[in-house]
Amino acid sequence: MAKNSKFEFEVEGVDYLTGDPKVKGRDIRTMSDHNPAAKYRLIEVMDRYTTSVGLEDPIEFVEGEKRIFRIAEGDRDFDFTVEDLGWEWCSGSINEADVRKYGRIADDRELFIEGPVERVVPRGGTVDLTGDDVERIYSRPAAKPTHIEVTFIINGEGHAVKAMPDDRLVDVLNEALKETENTGRPVTDWIVTTQPGAVLDVEKTLTELGIVDGTLLVASLKTGEAG
């Protein structure tokens, strides 16, 4: 393979190029300006797991494939599992977003830390790896909310209604009209729109319409029905 071929790798989100298809862990450190190399721990992101890269560990590049690395100053790696795959990490904490990204964990699943008392890893949170209580991180489907709150703007006033995700929008609207004493017209005389003005099909469920907790909607009489 030609010496001037460019092989790409990433360290801490920064892209680098090299013409050498075979390097060592020491080279990745120095090429990314982490000197002296021996002061830094380096890990490589693999297929849903990570692995430590020592100073003399060989790295062979394949043209067209980018290798991903994370690095931190320190003298030890931290071992744990994610979805039963072994991970090594270069610092004493790891972001929830990194676990999710590198572990390829879907957004509709929640992360948990195994232990005598199961702990939820909050969205956007950080997991402390320095203790002895983080050995296994795993995921499971996020619990669906039993109720959500939808706010309707009716006659210029906001009114919040509790509903189930599988409720039809027309039924939730009807409840909002009753609670605000707007019962002079049948519910069929009303339309519901998003704040940008898109008209919603009230026969669909809140889930089908993508309506989630905290959604703000506008309810108004159809043209020709006001008065």
Image (cartoon, rainbow, N blue to C red):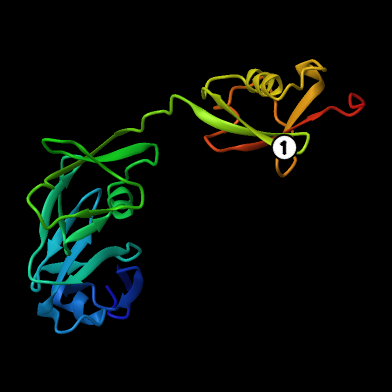
Residue 59, by quadrant, is bottom left
Residue at 11%, 35% (x, y): give it.
Answer: 116
Q: Position of residue 198 (x, y in %)?
A: 73, 38
Dot 1: few (<14), some (14–19), or many (≥20) neighbours within 10 Å?
few
Within the image, what quadrant is residue 12 found in? bottom left
Farthest top residue? 186
Front residue of 80/188: it is 188
Q: Residue at x 15, y 38 (%)?
A: 114
Callout 1: helix, strand or loop? strand
Q: Quadrant of the N terminus?
A: bottom left
Q: Residue 23, position in %: x, y?
A: 17, 74
Look at the image and tell me whether residue 180 can be seen.
yes
The one of 107 and 14 positioned closer to us in this rendering = 107
- The correct choice, above or below, for 186 with respect to 19 in the image is above
Residue 43 lies left or right of residue 155; in this view the side is left
- Residue situated in front as seen by the camera: 132 or 178: 178
Q: Is residue 6 visible?
A: no
Q: Name the residue at 72% across, 44% down.
A: 196
Q: Quadrant of the C terminus?
A: top right
Q: Amino acid at mark 1?
A: Glu
Q: Which residue is mark 1?
A: 157
Q: Is residue 31 left or right of residue 177?
A: left
Residue 221 position by quadrant: top right
| Residue at x 33% of width, y 76% of height | 17
- Which one is nearer the viewer's eye here, 30 or 157? 157
